[in-house]
């Protein structure tokens, strides 16, 4: 009798263990299904947003091709596409920092005021950016680095020794971090200018370089003839120019929208507004970034 009770007890324990194991399997399966459902919902939201954002970019490009003034200065606007409200930001390239030719003072200010580096750290990185681009193999400035220093440090790349065509190559500069690059990237462009055109620079960049919150918005809300006075007489004067010398213009278009599920999405395109005989449109799309999650526009425009 006792042996029978022990046998039944062992069987009951085994059953309980099996029930617990099956419960864990069911729970894991439910979590997996929930995660898959969330992933599908995320992808559908992104695809819906992407089609609308692409349409907004194309319509904006058409408008700028028809009216050159629309792409001549920094501007933001709203566009309604069906039930969707699109936030559009247009930034001419000459309002951004071209690391190929920008002054050392402007580069250092960008790394300090926007990137958050200390003065000494920024000075070293400016020297290394210069060495990465210049054609010689002699380290320059404070903490400069050429091929020999890259090899000694075990850095995975070597200096390019020529101007950057793709700004993401800055990630290959010794000492550059992914976080720092992502922080300064919204303020980089290729335009062949040492300084920033006042009318084209994003307000957040003006604020950072001048050290005055709200100055950029005041500059852009001022009549064009008064904008130079706001900046060219202050401490940020060395970074700005009153008018652009660029002939023909490339612009960055950033668009953002909120989908029904509450998510914000953004997409960015670089456009050359000059007509070319080898293209089917009056403009050329130079690059188009993938659709990505975004913060609300108020936060996005602060970077």
Image: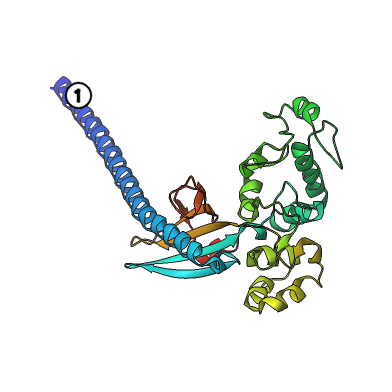
Residue 175 as seen in the image, left or right of residue 35: right
* Image location (x, y in percent) of residue 229: 77, 76
| Quarter of the image where one finds residue 139 | top right
Is residue 9 rendered to the left or right of residue 141? left
Give the camera-side residue of 89 and 149.
Answer: 89
- Examine the rendered structure and indicate whether residue 178 appears above or below residue 152: below
Q: The C terminus lies in which quarter of the figure? A: bottom right
Q: Which residue is mark 1?
A: 6
Can residue 59 be seen in the rendering of this structure?
A: yes
Q: How is the image coloured?
A: rainbow
Q: Residue at x 66, y 48 (%)?
A: 180
Image height check: is 206 above or below 175?
A: below
Residue 296 visible: no
Q: Residues within 10 Å of mark 1 (few under 14, many from 20)?
A: few
Q: Nearer the viewer, residue 302 or 38?
A: 302
Is 67 or 194 nearer to us in this picture? 67
What is the residue that sits farthest to the front in this orientation? 277
Q: Position of residue 152 (x, y in %)?
A: 78, 25
Question: Total marks drawn?
Answer: 1
Give SS at disc 1. Answer: helix
Measured from the top left, where is residue 1 in percent x and y? 12, 22
Residue for point 17% across, 22% down: 7
Q: Position of residue 84 (x, y in %)?
A: 36, 66
Residue at point 77% right, 61% down? 239
Taking 7 as reference, is 268 left or right?
Answer: right
């Amino acid at each position: 009798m006792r042996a029978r009770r022990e046998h039944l007890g062992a069987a009951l324990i085994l059953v309980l263990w099996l029930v617990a194991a099956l419960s864990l399997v069911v729970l894991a399966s439910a979590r997996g299904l929930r995660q898959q459902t969330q992933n599908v919902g995320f992808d559908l939201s992104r695809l819906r947003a992407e089609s609308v954002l692409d349409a907004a970019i194309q319509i904006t490009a058409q408008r700028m091709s028809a009216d050159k003034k629309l792409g001549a200065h920094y501007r933001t606007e709203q566009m309604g596409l069906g039930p969707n409200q699109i936030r559009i930001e247009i930034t001419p390239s000459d309002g951004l920092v071209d690391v190929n030719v920008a002054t050392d003072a402007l580069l250092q200010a960008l790394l300090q005021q926007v990137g958050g580096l200390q003065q000494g750290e920024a000075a070293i990185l400016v020297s290394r950016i210069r060495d990465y681009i210049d054609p010689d193999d002699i380290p320059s400035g404070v903490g400069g680095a050429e091929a020999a220093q890259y090899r000694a440090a075990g850095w995975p790349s070597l200096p390019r020794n020529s101007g950057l065509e793709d700004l993401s190559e800055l990630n290959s500069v010794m000492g550059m971090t992914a976080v720092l690059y992502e922080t300064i990237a919204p303020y980089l462009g290729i335009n062949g200018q040492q300084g920033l055109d006042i009318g084209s620079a994003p307000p957040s960049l003006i604020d950072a370089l001048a050290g005055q919150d709200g100055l950029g918005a005041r500059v852009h809300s001022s009549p064009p003839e008064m904008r130079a006075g706001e900046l060219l007489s202050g401490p940020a004067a060395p970074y700005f120019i009153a008018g652009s010398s660029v002939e023909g213009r490339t612009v960055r278009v950033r668009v953002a929208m909120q989908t029904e599920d509450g998510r914000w999405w953004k997409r960015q395109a670089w456009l050359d507004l000059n007509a070319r005989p080898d293209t089917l449109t009056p403009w050329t799309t130079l690059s188009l970034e993938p659709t990505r999650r975004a913060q609300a526009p108020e936060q996005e425009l602060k970077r």
